Each structure stands twice: as structure tokens, then as C-alpha cells.
Amino acid sequence: MKVSLSWLGTYLDLSMDSAQLTQALTMAGLEVEAVNDRFSFLDTVLVGRVAAVAPHPQANKIKLCQVQTGERTYSVVCGAPNVKPGMLAPLALPGTELIDGTILTHSTIRGQSSEGMLCSEVELGLGLDASGLMVLNKALNPGTSLNRALNLSDPVLDISLTPNRSDCLSIIGIAREVAGLQGTSIKRPVIQLPETHGNINDHTSVIIQATDHCPRYAARLMTNIKVAPSPFWLQDRLRSVGLRPINNLVDITNFVMLETGQPLHAFDFDHLTEHRIVVRTAEKGEKFTTLDNKVRELSPEMLMICDGQKPVGIGGGMGGLNSEIEGGTSRVLLESAYFNPISIRKTAKHLGLNSDAAHRFERGVDPHGTLYAIDRAAALIVQLGKGKLVGGTIDIRNDLPEPVVVRLSVPAANRTLGTNLDATLMADLLDAIEFKVSAPGDDELLVEVPSFRVDVSRPEDLMEEIARRWGYDKIPTTFTVIPAISQAASTLWIQRQLIRERLAGMGFNETINYSFIHKDSCDRINLGKDDIRRRQIEVLNPLSEDQAVLRTSLVPSLLETMQRNLARQTKTMKLFEVGKIFISRGADSLPVENDMLAGLWTGDSTTSGWFGKPVACDYYDLKGVIESLFMGLHLPSADFTKLEATKCTYTRPGVSARITLRGREVGILGEINAKVLDAYDLKQPAFFFEIDFRVLTELIPDSIVAQPLPKYPSTVRDATLIVDHDIEAQSLIARVKSMDQPLVEDVHIFDVYRGTPVPENRKSISLRIIYRSAQETLEDETVNQIHKEITNRLVAQFRADLPV
């Protein structure tokens, strides 16, 4: 809400300057975000003396002027008819922003350089005379900035209002607050309605069909109106708070809305079919063209203002193009209404209407301020439009909000606020902002809430009013008593931090996504119909379609993050997230909440440089990350076994694995399949892992047992077996470990080969087995015998062949 002090000062005598007012309002809960002098743009407009005027060599109607500012002389091209030597006029220098938004630059006009611009009143927003240059008093000193020369200063406060303070969406509302701070009273404009003729009921009528959406609707009629530009004082008021003047009728409705907080709307009466108003809800699929020339499709819960046949405005939002005020308008029907705030909010959100009227209606206007605003506007329209006022007001009222009376306990208020105020002081603080207070007892106040304070209904609301009126800075600061006993962080938190550090150390970036995802995410990652993760929990009032349900997997969020980054030309990403998933157990039970760890790698595994070209990441890169993570967590080596396609429908068959630790399945690893990539519009491969965080942390050891370094050397033997192509290499390693041979220290695969001379549907797998004894150096004969036994067992179990 913008408030100029010149406008504010018409409703009360200001005893505070802008700095004091800013501090006082902020401490009263109305935060002033900025203070700007609206005449500051005149700093670069100087008082100039026209020293010489000469004809332009290439144009008859413009002249070349030499303008002195004391320090130097400027060459200016000017077309004003009243320019003459010796006169003083405003000289705007390059960089000046004029009232219409134009920013002056050093220019060349018809081949002649112009170092500035001599200005009229209208170009500077200081008057309406556009016929020639603004003539300044000859007593002024050339070179002085115009705002200082004319003593022009008008600070404008930009006040940030919380949604509950709709009463301050008006100049009078702010004036009321300032009056309370100063201990003075406000001076409301006195309305003097002109002489009327006839009766409005003979010309028009109002029918409210949707009474729950529109509890009150008032109308007045004016005739013989002349649409014309507004007088300077009205234009200046609107410009002072950033509004652009249009014409006298529109400007008056905007002026009264800003003054009182009550939105108004003026209809061209001759454009209303049957000359009457019907307030109803829209029909399904009905379309309407608003004043901004947009065609909007309506729904049945939206409130419409209609004439005898068609809609002419969206209730509380925006008028229609079919009834707008035009240059030839002579009869005006003026609307002032109280609409249901919830109805207006829903309509504005659905249609994307961000009008000043909707902003006020959806927060709640004064239901009893309707007639004051319409009378104020009617008097101004007749005065400035030189028309006639038809007698009477149509005022249809239904179930308006009842007056609110609240009992406030003084001890309870002091206990809540941490103050020691007596009942008299509390009453004075409330009375200063027009609350009616009586004291039925020494420790209790009976408070009648004014109708413009639609946000106050409970004792706690009154306590807030007392606190901000007393001043938040006066309330003593207290601190919660906290025992000076430190507590060790939980094991789960430590483990979570450890996992984050390990992944960050491997170059991964942590992402934090919303717990809400799109409802079709399960379809996009191709989950099976019976997958437990399809048991989603819908959000009753989602912010958007993309946040309609609670997530049942972290994978959709990671893929959406990948999509956003690819769109910004980030091709390589290493991402991880630790977060909860939510599985529904039915409407009557709380959901299952599981902590999960998920990661994604796409793009390159190495960057380009003098040593070679970049290499794309693959399944084995991410598998190495998992193995390194487990090693850093002091976990045993994991088993990566074949993952059936039916178990995970969003991975590529043959490039995915089940991750097992100590016989417990902890997660999956693999490449995202092409169908899922297409669903997210992703054009490059991506590899991911998903781990049950709870199971993983249960397996992390609480302590580490150190072992002495081996004293004796190890011996290595290799074994190459030719097996069927569908046998997992991991199964060979698992079988060697299951033999419990005490001299086998480690076993791993160092080569897998398919092709000639290996037969078709077969593959060659090479194992490297490390032997070591803790008591002695092993002899070749001993190692060879053990190695031969292990090899024979593998050959027998897997029906393997040895290479020739």
C-alpha cells in the first residue's frame, strides 16, 4: 500500500516527519518497506535561463535555444511557442525520467544537437498546461534543481500489509492508525450531495439471486455526465501513489477506492439491457470478455454482475468490455457492494485476476461502509462531470456480519504479552483506533469491534492490537529457561550427516525437493498396477497440479531436477537426496513414512582435457560410488545380483541390480529405461540408486574393531571359467566365499568376455583370488592345491568349462 504524505495530510494534522512516521508505523505492525520522495526525479531538472533563441535551419516550428544554468550553457532544440530570451523555464538534463516514464537522452533533432529538454507543466506532472513551457518566477536562481527551487517534496510510504489488515488498504485506514499514534483524530471528508431529481427506482432495479456470494449491493444513478480529463488535483492524487489517470469517471472510482478501501464500479447505463442489474452465479462454460480484452471461461461458483440479458462484470474482480465508460457516456450507474471474501478469492485465483478491487474484496471490506463510499463518489462525479444526480439509493441487504463483541481478561492479556498494563490504558489504546470499550469489571473489558476490522473476533486478536499499539519495542524481552546440559546428537542424525559427507566427497550435490509431486508420477515412472507405491495420499488443497500428492518415491523428484538442469544446459549431474516417502494405509490411518536415500548420475564421468576426451558415465561408475559409500560407512562388501524386470519397471533390463548387505536387501541400482526418460522429456541416459535408509543405518556398526596388519605376504591365483551367459558373475564370488576356506582373503572379478573363441550363449569370467595366512608364508604347493579344489567345485556347480 502506497501512501503519500500530502494526501495523508488532508485527513489529519501530521506532527511527525517521514522518518518518525516510518518508525512509528513499523513498531505498530505496519512495516514501511521504503520511503521515496515522488519529486526526487526533479533533482536533474534545473532552473534554466533562456539566453538566446534562433531559428532551426531545417524546420520552421522548432528553435535552437541557448539555456544557461549558472555553471554552463546548454544547446537545446525546443518547439514550444512561448519560448523567448530572458525567460526562466525547467531544463531536464539527460537521464531524467519524465512523468510518462520517458527517460531523456542526449539526442540529435534534424541535424542539431539537443543536450536537454525545456519542459511544460504537464511533462513534469506539475499542472495540466501543455500549450507551452512552464514559466518560472524570475526571482529563482538558474542552476537550482526544480524541487528545491519550488520547495517540492512529498514522501511516499510503501507499507507492507499482512493479509488480515484489509482496513489499511485505504488512505483513511492509514490515517486512522497515524491518528492513534499521535493521539489525535481524523477528519473524514464531509459529503455534500447535490440536489437530486426523480427517483432511481423509476429507472432501474437490482435483484440478488446469489445472496451467499453477495450479501449487499448498492447503486446510484447519474445523468447528463460529461466524460473529460480529471482536474489536476485528482490526477496528482492518483499519480502520487503510482496510478495513471484515465478520465474523470474512472479516476473518481479509483480515488474513492484508495481513500475509503471500498472498490466501486461505474457502468454505462445505456449499455445495460433492460436498464437493470441481476447478481447471479455464472453458468457452466459461460464466457465473458473483461476490460483487459481477455476472454475468460467461467465456472458455476463464480459471481457475475449482469444486466437483463448478459453478464457485464465479474463480481469483485473486473468489469466487462460491453459496459465500460466511453467518451460518449452520459448516464452512469455506480455500484458499491459487499461480496463474500472467499467467493472473490476463489474466482480471482482461478481466473488469474489481480485487480485492486479483487485484492481488497478477498481480504474483506467494511460491510457497513458501502453507502459512504457510493455517496462520496456520486458527489464527486456530479461535481466534476457536471451532471445530475437521480434521487435515492438502491441498497439490497441480506445477511450481513453481525457486530462482534469480545470479552477481554486484563490479567490474561498481560500474562500472554508479558506486560503490566492496567485496564484503563488498554481501553485507551483500543479506543484510539475506534474500538468501543466498556469495563464491566476491574479485570475485564467488553469491546465492540468496529465493522472495518473484519480480522478481529477473539480475545487474542485484541491482545495483538494492544501489543502493537503499546509498541513491540516496549515489551520486555524474555528468554526461555534452557538447562545448561548438552545432549549428544542422535545416532540417526550422525549417520545421516556421515552419508551426506561421503556422497558430497565423491562429487555429488544434495537436492532438497518438495514432498509433493504430480499425481501422474507413478505412471511416468511406469510403476506396476499392484506396486505399493501407487497408494498415494492426495493433498486436499494443492498449490498446483505438480504438488497434488505426497511422494511415494524419490525418483520422480530427481528426474524433474535433472530435467530443469538440462533445460539450462547443465549436461552432467551427480545428485542425491535423503528424504521421506509416504505410503497410504487408508483414510482412517496415518501413512507409512519411510526414509530413503536416492542418487542420480547423468552426463560424463571424466571431463575433457589434455589427457583426452570426456567419457560418459555408466552403470559401473555408480556401482563404484555405492561400494565406496559402504566402505566409508565401514560396511562389508555388498552383493549386486540380477534384478528381475517385474521387480523394477523403471530400469533398463540387464543394466540393473538388487543391492544386498549381510543377506538383507537394501536397495536397487540401475539405468533409467527409455520409456521413463521420454515421459520426462530427457534426451540422455541416467543412472540411479535407491536405498532404504532405515535398513542401511541399522547395518552400520556402532564401533570399529581394529586388526593388526598382516605379517606375511599374500599370493594371487586367477581362475577363468566359461559359463552360460545368464549366470551372474556375482554368484561365482558368493560361492567362493561360501566355501569358508580360511586362507582365502579376498576374491573379485577382473574380466568378463563374450565372443570368439568362446561359444555362443556362453561367456568367460575371470576371478582373482587372494590367499594369505596369518601364521606363515604360504607355499606354492599348498596354494595350488586349494586353488584347484575351489576351481573344480565351481566347474561342477556351474557346469563350467576351463579354457583350452
Image (cartoon, helix red, strand yellow):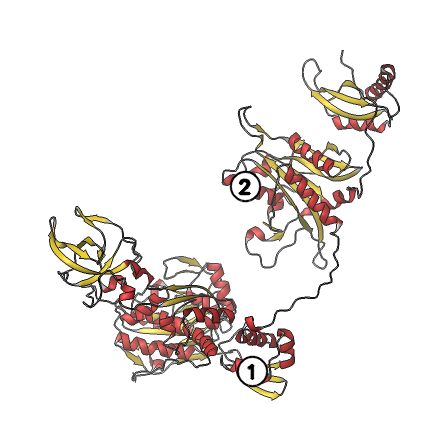
Mark 1, Cα crowd under 10 Å, few <14 / some 14-19 / many 20+, is few
Nearer-the-camera pick, 171 or 522: 171
**Residue 109 place in picture, x, y as percent:** 19, 49
Q: Earlier in the sequence, mark 2 or mark 1?
A: 1
**Residue 47 place in picture, x, y as percent:** 23, 62
Q: Is residue 418 above or below residue 425?
A: above
Disc marking residue 563:
2
Q: Is residue 726 above or below residue 142?
A: above
327 left or right of 276 in image? left
| Amino acid bearing label 1 | Leu
Tell which tag, 2 or 1, sits nearer the viewer: 1
Mark 2, Cα crowd under 10 Å, few <14 / some 14-19 / many 20+, is some
Q: Hey, which quadrant is residue 537 in on the image?
A: bottom right
Q: Is residue 300 visible?
A: no
| Amino acid bearing label 2 | Gln
Q: Hey, which quadrant is residue 500 in on the image?
A: top right
Kindly state the secondary structure of the residue where label 1 is placed.
helix
**Residue 430 place in picture, x, y as percent:** 53, 80
Q: Is residue 376 above or below residue 342?
A: below
Q: Is residue 437 visible?
A: yes
Question: Split into 4 quadrants, where in the image is the C terminus?
Answer: top right
Determine the residue located farthest toward the front in the rendered image.
Answer: 71
Q: Which residue is mark 1?
A: 425
96 left or right of 215 in image? left
